[in-house]
Amino acid sequence: MRFLEYLNRGKVYLDGGMGTLLQGRGLKSGEQPELWNISHPTEIREIHKAYYDAGSNVVCTNTFGANLLKFTEDKLVEIIAAAVENAAAARAESTAPQEKFIALDIGPTGKLLKPLGDLDFEEAVKVFAKTVEIGAALGVDLIMIETMNDSYETKAALLAAKENSTLPVIVSNAYGENGKLMTGADPAAMVAMLEGMGADALGANCSLGPEQLTGVAEELLANASVPVLLKPNAGLPKEVDGKTLFDVTPAEFAECLARLIEKGLRIAGGCCGTTPEYISALYKRTADITPPPCPKKNFTVVSSYTHAVSFGKTPLLIGERINPTGKKRFKQALAEKDMDYILSEGINQQEKGVHILDVNVGLPEINETEMLCAAVCELQAVSDLPLQIDSADPVAMEAAMRRYNGKAMINSVNGKAESMAAVFPLVKKYGGLVTALTLDENGIPATAEGRLEIAKRILQTAEEYGIDKKDIVFDTLAMTVSADNKAATVTLDALKRIREELGCHTVLGVSNVSFGLPNRDAINSIFFTLAMENGLSAAIMNPYSADMEKAYYCFKALKGLDENCGDYINAAAGFATVTTAATSVPKAEDCDGTELQRAVVKGLKDKAAELTKEMLKTTPPLDVVNNDIIPALNKVGSGFEQKTVYLPQLLMSAEAAKAAFEVIKATVTTEGKSASGGTFIIATVRGDIHDIGKNIVKLLLENYGFDVVDMGKDVPPEAIAKKAVELHAPIVGLSALMTTTVPAMEETVALLKEQAPWCKTIVGGAVLTEDYAKKIGADKYAKDAMEAVRYAEKLLKN
Amino acid sequence: MSAVTLTNLKPAEGYCEKEVLRYAGCKEPTEEICELIKVCYEELEDRLTYRLCYRKLSLEISDDHCDFGCFSVRSRDLAKNLKGCKSVIVFAATVGVATDRIIARYNRVSPARALIMQALGAERVEALCDEFCKTLAAEYNTRPRFSPGYGDLPLAVQKELFAALECYRHIGISLNESLLMAPSKSVTAFVGIY
């Protein structure tokens, strides 16, 4: 019988611990257990057989760490072949009557993925792919991915399993005492991602005993539609006379799992510290229990690497600001690849309370695939909100979906055959919640009836691809009311009917409705309210709009969706219209000068921006820069050089100055950037991932008007040299924090001398000294950010 | 030699302002800086996940060669620190990945906050180490802790330390190719017992 067929009939028993038993048979600490498949086949077979004899349906091969990061490919083939053979021999020898299967066991690589660690996502996929490829060819019955404590690595492993075999895959994560994975995901987030990608079962193993994992198991059961598995440790390890013992007995272990099987747990086994005795106790205690059926949940959810967001009664907010349409400043940022600007839009919207961020970086002149991928990855390094990947290009869409850590929202598919054929296979493969626009080859129907018909057709086609109704939200398209005075009512009618007749969730980009009208926020916010009343599940909107904010929180409070009106009260504090007579910046004994100067010196970001806005009404921008901002910066800068001002204060002032510059930039929107002396390339060298120092230098250089091209951290010498040649950059700044990465700095300096001989190199970082800098051939050593600024000024402004 | 043990130790809540300022490179703080530290800590507090694992190892020293049974290292400074000890506790401690995420976030939008978060993370993980060393000192006669990278103790010893403690499996710290730890606010150290 096939594994899935057996699983669908009822319960499955897994095996128990392997490592602890091997240690008992003489495996030394530090010795790789996978090598025992070859050197000690008898011992391995004995353990596998004991589990089959105890009642296990599934035995996992001894291949937990069998991957390309630990072994050469030849060795890997040898190990996995021996491991599968050992399991097969045990299966043949065991006379126990139950159905018996062999799972190819896959554990974590032991390395953290980027951006937290240094293993690239695609690299991880390749590592797992090799193990899958070898194992699948040897005739195992299923793949078991287990003990994963990072959602991103779990995704890499599952993707590799799906791309390189047709075997059933069950996925198990290691949850900590806080009920989350080490990198932050909770059970609901894991269910969203794993079910989206087509895991055949999912669950938890290792780290804790059955009692402590009960909460996690219950949460999984409450969210999952596929069978749930639990493979806990035999409690917590204790040391007695130099030996590790576990504190849960086989009977207690079986009792605890029995309670969970009664609640719907379908797959059970043991992890560290458990032995065939535990499995035998489990089997005997639970053989007669029939778990209740696992109902399909039909939850409409998206997730990030920490949490899931579900569509339900309370409408959700999707921030629309990461989108160049109609935004000059954003287009400029995209053209300049100014990722910091894009990221700050994400962070600011999150602070405004949105639940999901829309990400659209499509501009004709840029490489959208590259940019969308970069934006999604970088946003996921700074924000834990789920993202809506928004692109008209299926290639860009796929690249971003593949890299996304979680279950993304996808914007969008529509009723055109071509659109569905391009988007649905991606949703099926990577998982996702897809926004479907109610338009087709004939355009947007003028009636609600017409839009409903398209929605039905989309659902039908989705079903053919194996995509559930719950994974589609409909956008009934808000049209400009100034062009057609029935536009809004048709949209709202269609919305209501889709919500009520099809039972699907809905989404609208509300701002379109007011196009061409004055005071757009007024119309938008009332339309938003009407839409929510007609069953809108989520709005793509501008979270900076006070009118929209008011509409949202008032609606929630009035509809009984806001306990004690708590959210309303919190938000209402910010409703007050812009303060005109704000408190002035107090004089300080160490700083006279104008108010803006004092705001910069004291590092008051918001105040500096506000004052600049005020001053620009009467003063030319260049005067504000030269008479206020620069003198204030100089004051702090020279204080820093004289050691009367310290680094945190220097940075706070620099940020205040940057906020003031941002106001000037937005007001002036001149062509090109500043009247600066040229381009300054800056990077942290290969192998080094410390970038705080580099970012400080960058911030100050920007303050002083330099165009800074920031290449990031861990940058190879070739890339830096190439960029210097491409931009004919007069100066390159390199940072290294560790002695181990100074050679990479030396290599970079040498390559620059060879390929860009005109270019000056300036180096800095904790381990460098004047002498060291000279030794590696750099033109200048800067002990801090101010010194780098002074040198650049001397060099470029003459 | 014994197995790896996990603890549930946590340092006292709050932070030592003087230490945070030291890590941030600030001798005389302004009011605004102290306020910024306070605000940053409030944001960081719930994201700290303190984890620590340790293991007792045997010790034999000859000249600058320190042998711990499952691995050994040459270091004059460590040998001096451990002189007269019969065994050693090796440990690894971390405040978790969420701190790195918050540092990464502010690195992009506010270097001042990034600097303070960095300093707070360093202060917190050291506070965890202090707490652990205090519990050790209550049970044994201990030497001050000594970490890879101090004096002439090579960073390369991290590889052996990580294998001996199985850091990734136990508390989620991994080592990259430059021998840096991720999460970055992590510490490993030797504590001599005499």
Image: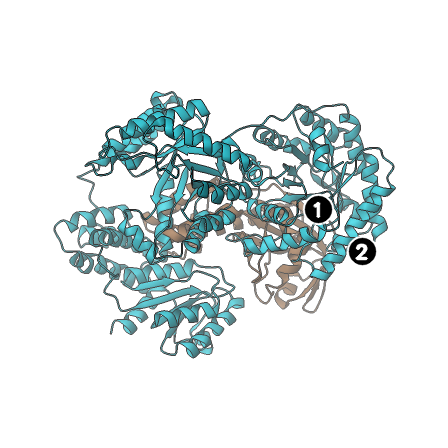
Chain colours: A cyan, B brown
Subunit that carries the residue with mark 2: A
Q: Which residue is mark 1?
A: A105
| x, y percent for residue A316 | 40, 32
- Check the image and report above or below for A90 versus A332: above
**Residue A587: percent from left, percent from top:** 20, 49
Q: Quadrant of residue A454?
A: top left
The answer as to whether the residues below labels 2 and 1 share one chain is yes
Residue B161, picture quadrant: bottom right
From the image, tell me which residue sits under label 2: A38
Pointer 2 local density, CA inside 10 Å: few below 14, some 14–19, many at least 20: some
Q: x%, y% of residue A646?
A: 35, 58
Quarter occupied by the C terminus of chain A: bottom left
Relative image position of residue B59 (x, y in whole percent)? 72, 59
Tell me if residue A586 can be seen. no
Q: Amino acid at mark 2?
A: Ile
Asked if residue B44 is positioned above or below residue B177 in the image, the reply reads above
Tell me if residue A748 can be seen.
yes
Q: Which mark is residue A70?
A: none
